[in-house]
Image (cartoon, rainbow, N blue to C red):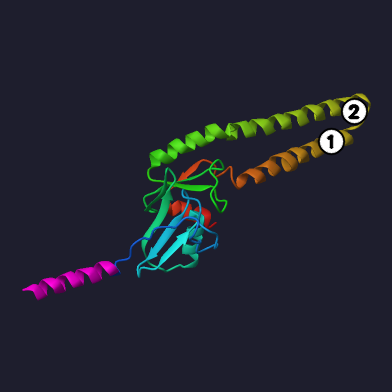
Amino acid sequence: MKYPVALSLLVLSVVFACTPSPQEIHYGEDACHSCLMTIVDERHAAELVTSKGKVFKFDAIECMVRHMKEAKGQEYAHVLVCDYEHPRTLIDADVATYLISPSIPSPMGAFLSAFSTREAATMMQKSAKEREGVGEDDVTTKYAKKREGIIEEDVTTRNTKEREGVGDDVTTKNTKEHEGIIEDDVTTKYAKEREGIIEKDGQIYDWKSIQQVINQ
């Protein structure tokens, strides 16, 4: 009777030994599989475990996302990210909530952090905006005032020239130049500067959508 019991225990030990499982990340020692940098940030690290049990460690979520795109077709038993609020704690990437905020730098520059709940991400989103002190409305107002200043100067210049007897051609030219300044130098310039981060600033994502953002 002892042999069947021993055999059962042996089978169970083999099964558990072959089950893919996560590994501890040794901060300051392990290297990121993607960028090869030493993993030191305990709030932004990530880990993949393939269906065959191979483990890949990353210093940032964005590194892991890019690797998954390159290794398309690979099956994973575990896709894990660090919970920002609980350093070194790996959570399921599929159920985590993600926040992009310039107030929270991540190792590879995506400003991407993961949270165990949407509520936690929302609270951090609010806190980050308060720390920044300047919201999107403030930025818009700032450059709107700059444009108003240009408009005021242009109108004054145009009226002065009209009083001095300068014809419609100069007025038209000045108007067109003014429109060019407003459209190209101010609006377009700052729109382009802001489209990279400001569009995503403070945005909350699920796992599927954050992959799309990082892989754009």
For the residues labelled 1 and 2, the Cα–Cα distance comes to 10 Å
Label 1: which secondary element: helix
Residue 174, numbered circle = 1
For numbered disc 2, what is the local secondary structure? Answer: helix
Residue type highlighted by circle 2: Lys
For residue 144, side relative to residue 134 (left or right): right
Label 1 Cα neighbours within 10 Å, binned few <14 / some 14-19 / many ≥20: some
Q: Which residues are magenta?
A: 1-17
Residue at 39% x, 38% y: name it.
119
Neighbor class of circle 2 (other Cα within 10 Å; few <14, some 14-19, many 20+) is: some
Placement of 168 over or under 79, stated as above or below: above
Q: Nearer the viewer, residue 96 or 10?
A: 10
Q: Which residue is mark 2?
A: 161
Residue drawn at (48%, 59%), measured in percent from left and top? 58
**Residue in view at x 49 percent, y 59 percent:** 29
Where 156 sits versus 1, above or below?
above
The quarter of the displayed image where residue 75 is located: bottom left
Q: Judge whether residue 15 is colored magenta.
A: yes
The answer to which of marks 1 and 2 sits earlier in the sequence is 2
Seen in the picture, residue 54 relative to 177 is either above or below; the reply is below
Q: Main secondary structure of the magenta part?
A: helix
Query: Are the two marked residues, 1 and 2, in contact with CB atoms closer than 8 angstroms?
Result: yes
Where residue 37 sits in the image (x, y, percent)? 55, 60
Q: Which mark is residue 15?
A: none
Q: As shown in the figure, which amino acid type bears the numbered disc 1?
A: Asn
Q: Position of residue 191 (x, y in %)?
A: 65, 43
200 or 9, which lies in front?
9
Please report the residue visible at 53 percent of the width from the left and 49 percent of the height from the top: 106
Image quadrant occupied by the N terminus: bottom left
* Along the viewing direction, whichever of 21 and 40 lies nearer the viewer: 40
Provide residue 136's location: percent of width, then percent of height.
59, 35
In percent of width and height, residue 72 lies at: 45, 67
